[in-house]
Image: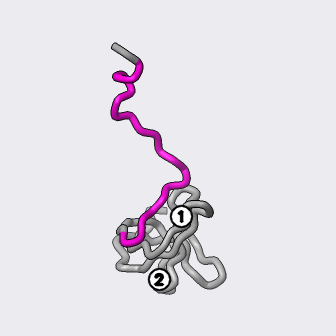
Amino acid sequence: MSLESFFAGVGFRTNTPSFEAGEEITAFVTGVEDGTAIARVGDSKLRIADAPADAVDTLVRLRVEAFDDDTHVGQAEYLETVGASSF
């Protein structure tokens, strides 16, 4: 068995995931920066301008509007709250 066949299908996670415009994801709102809610996925950050005022520490469904692969920062549209933090 070759090393290539041994590792076939194996992938590695990144701490800076990338997103495509139109992609829908769920993420925790982790804080607020300059009055805008922020969701962090690894070291990538999504700004959510239209998030509810009480969105911090909730799990929300988002639609990515734009994402910059160089800075790992993007904009997302708030769709709905789907859960609360367990802490």
Answer whether residue 8 is magenta in the image: yes
Look at mark 2 in the image and give the residue it sits on. Answer: 51
- Whether residue 8 is visible here, answered yes or no, is yes
Way the structure is coloured: one colour
Q: Quadrant of the N terminus?
A: top left
Q: Residue at x 62, y 63 (%)?
A: 71
Considering depth in this image, is 34 or 67 the residue closer to the camera?
67
Q: Which residues are magenta?
A: 3-22
Where residue 17 sits in the image (x, y, percent)? 49, 55
Left of 52 or right of it: where is 70?
A: right
Answer whether residue 64 is magenta in the image: no
Farthest residue, direction right: 34
Look at mark 1 in the image and give the residue it sits on. Answer: 40
Q: Residue at x 62, y 85 (%)?
A: 35
Could you tell me which secondary element the residue under label 2 belongs to?
Answer: loop
Residue type at mark 1: give it. Arg
- Whether residue 60 is visible here, answered yes or no, is no
